[in-house]
Amino acid sequence: MRYEEPSFEEKGIIMNQKEIDGNRSQVAYSSEGKMKGSIEVTNTRDFIIVSKGNNVTCAQGQGVITTKDDSGKANYAFLAVGKVTEEGKPVFLGSAVCGAQTLEVGWHF
């Protein structure tokens, strides 16, 4: 098996977070990033995060990725599992399913 570079990298901020119960929260998140290394995009999403203990978190939600030049847009739903590193950086791995109006760059999650 050959591992490739990530097809999407981003940096963003939590816009709003509301606790639902002891281990679940609803989150609104916005970011800017690059797809395939050079296509600049904005990403907004809403999701529920669930703490599973032992530094493991699951996230499930939906979002919209739009190219900076407004030439492409993709609605998606996602599911991810992650953790926070010793440096405090959240790292998630998961998958996303796009709607019919997808970006022309391809998806390789």
Image: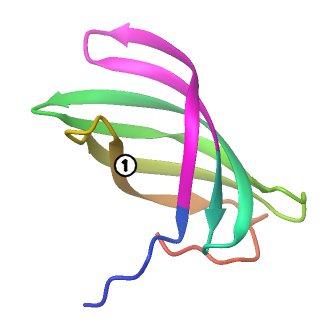
Residue at the far left in the pictured view: 54
Q: Main secondary structure of the magenta part?
A: strand
Residue 84 in the image: state x and y as whole percent.
26, 38
Residue where numbered disc 1 is placed: 80
Asked whether 29 or 13 is in front, the reply is 13
Residue at the far bottom in the pictured view: 1
Task: Tell me if residue 28 is in the magenta stretch.
Answer: yes
Q: Is residue 43 left or right of residue 90?
A: right
What residue is shown at x 76% (from left), y 76% (from top)? Answer: 104
Residue 1 in the image: state x and y as whole percent.
25, 90
2 is higher (above) or lower (below) than 86 = below
Task: Tell me if residue 101 is in the magenta stretch.
Answer: no
Residue at the far front in the pictured view: 87
Asked whether 11 or 27 is in front, the reply is 11
What residue is shown at x 34% (from left), y 40% (from top)? Answer: 89
Residue at the far right in the pictured view: 70
Q: Amino acid at mark 1?
A: Ala
What residue is shown at x 61% (from left), y 75% (from top)? Answer: 36
Snapshot quadrant of residue 39: bottom right
Q: Is residue 77 left or right of residue 105?
A: left
Residue 9 in the image: state x and y as whole percent.
53, 59
Image: magenta residue range: 9-31
Within 10 Å of the Cα at label 1, are there few (<14), some (14-19), or many (20+) other Cα atoms?
A: some
**Secondary structure category for the residue under label 1:** strand
Residue 13 in the image: state x and y as whole percent.
57, 31
